Amino acid sequence: MSLFSPFIAVFELKIIYLQNIFGYNISYDIYNMTRKILVLSVAILLCFLCPHVTIASGGGQKTKSQLWKECEKARILSNYNALEKLSNQLMSISVEDNDKRMQSYALFYRGLSQLFSGKAKNSLSTFDKAKSIAEEIENDSVQALVMNAVGIYHAMVENNSFMAQQYFFKGIKLANNSGYNSLKSRIYGNMLILTQSDRDTTALGNAFRIYNYGKREGDYEQTFMGAYYLAMYYNLRSDNENAEHYIKESLELYRKYDYDDVSAVYTLLSKIKADEGKLDEATLHATTAIRLAREKNQPQLVPDAYTQYATILNEQGKYAESNRVARMALDASKDVSIHTKRVTCMRLIADNCKHLGLKDEAIEYLVKANLMMDTLSRINMDRLMHERTIMLDIEQKEREAVIHKKEMESQLKINVTLAVTTMILIVLLSIIVANYRRRNRLYKNIVKQNTRALAYQAQLQQRIDSLNSRIAVQAKPSSGMVGQGGQTQDNKTFNDLYERACQMMEDERLYADSQLNRERLAELLGTNRTYLSRIIKENSGMNYIQFVNSYRIQEAIHILSDRSKIDYPLKQIWCDLGFNSPATFYKIFQQTVGMTPSVYRKQFINVEKEMSETS
């Protein structure tokens, strides 16, 4: 069904209606033409009303609106791996369209994924970029989201309650300005977690406000958040009945919508069960919390889950096992820079060590915990004392930071370019040096092999000459043997002719004659040029030119490998060996030996020098 089918159907019904009213048939041609006009008019109307609508969307690229909705869904479900990928896609398409609003949202989502996936230190710069764009386009909603996220950063990573509150208050103000009520509720919830006080009735009121808002608006995110906050508050007041009621409601919503941060609910449920004295159930929920935090890649929830499990083991008297789990919690806290949790872990380790009789280690960890707590308290006090100065200077520092950042980025680009260029040059130089050395080693090996081969060939030739002399002395002339100088071509074998050709080349050095050609060599052998080419090809695998040049190159190697002929000019060699030009000589020598004659001679001199030094 096409997009225009409903309009066409209505049009056809109108036609039938007119036919029934007036009692005659409308011409088919008129009907068809009118139908086309209708389709064209609707298409033009849609183009004006919905310029960004894709009429035929066969699974193409997602729109910004679709990506934004998927980012929001991933945020609600705490699926930060998916959020990172989706935010990058949203950023890419928003940059192409120069959509500042969606760029600010994309940066916010990217920063959020960094904050909760173990890259918290990187999130601040991302949030700053989102805030700058939101301020530029005067979008209070995005600014409110960023203020809430930065507040979470200061509370969770920096353990700075003062700064966290300041950002939360800014977020609430901006949320009020933009009418972003659901975000305002979320910020109140974060402030509730920040205080963690059983005497704070305002926190209880905020928790109920969030819960009731979610129920009233059908907002399941606000509902489970409110239920979780209420369970946490009642747990702080040791009202386990109410705490268990609300945590179970929160858990049902978590299970229903498959939230990735469900580990936090199981950790709180474990605390409630532990307070009730049901340690076996508490253990089950704590181990479930650890498993889900690992499976769903929620590193910021791992320390809480491990700490809760270690606490239960401590209460059960399993001090060694509690110590092991507490150390795992301590390592996990270091990984995500949650300093307050590290204090809790150290104190738990100290208590375990005390029960295990490890007094020195218990004192060591207790001292470490107190020092860290004192440090954190002192830092918070110092920050509180400098509140006014921080607030007055923050805008100036932000401007300076932007300028400095641009300068740093420019310098970084220059440094990266220089570093990459240097690395490329070093790599190229290394490759050149390595190839040069490898080539020299190869050349030396070739020269050494040729030198040894020539020496062995000379020894072998001496033996052959000596053996021929003995045979000549011992041989007697045979009577009745008549030379067969008149042998015909048919009586000559391939091997005899080829051996005679090789013998003539070696003894008479026919190859040194630059005028030597196939006709002349065939005439000397008593055959024709075609038969000669066939003989050479079938015995050596070479053509006539290659056959002759092989003797020339062999003689050239012999000359270049003779220490007594070091001063033999290269320009004389090619002429004496029958080559028509030095270019031909150099080319064939390079192809045959693998190097030029001059390089060969140089390598031979080096080899001779090395041999003389070693001897």
Image (cartoon, rainbow, N blue to C red):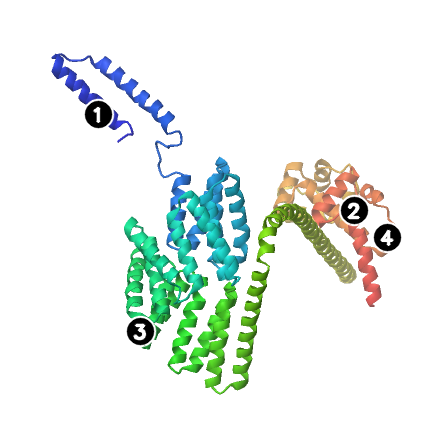
Residue 22 located left or right of residue 384: left
- The residue labelled by disc 2 is 508
Q: Do the residues bearing badges 2 and 1 touch, measured as CB atoms within 8 Å?
A: no
> How many angstroms separate mark 3 from mark 4 (CA)?
95 Å
Q: Do the residues bearing badges 4 and 1 touch, measured as CB atoms within 8 Å?
A: no
Residue 321 located left or right of residue 454: left
The picture places residue 512, in percent across and down from the top left corner, at 79, 43
Q: Nearer the viewer, mark 4 or mark 2?
A: 4
How packed is label 2: few (under 14 Cα within 10 Å), some, or many (20 or more)? few
From the viewer's side, name the closer residue of 96 and 577: 96
Return the disc, 2 or 1, that comes first in the chain's sequence: 1
How packed is label 4: few (under 14 Cα within 10 Å), some, or many (20 or more)? some
Q: Residue 224 falls in which quadrant of the image?
A: bottom left
Q: Nearer the viewer, mark 3 or mark 4?
A: 3
Return the disc, 2 or 3, that comes first in the chain's sequence: 3
- The residue labelled by disc 1 is 9
Q: Do the residues bearing badges 4 and 2 touch, measured as CB atoms within 8 Å?
A: no
Residue 336 located left or right of residue 187: right
Residue 436 visible in image: yes
Return the disc, 4 or 2, that comes first in the chain's sequence: 2
Residue 287 visible in image: no
Q: Secondary structure at mark 3?
A: helix
Q: Do the residues bearing badges 3 and 4 touch, measured as CB atoms within 8 Å?
A: no
- The residue labelled by disc 3 is 281
From the viewer's side, name the closer residue of 52 and 554: 52
Q: Secondary structure at mark 4?
A: loop
Q: Secondary structure at mark 2?
A: helix
Relative height, residue 612 to residue 57 (above, below)? below
Relative height, residue 60 to residue 463 (above, below)? above
- The residue labelled by disc 4 is 566
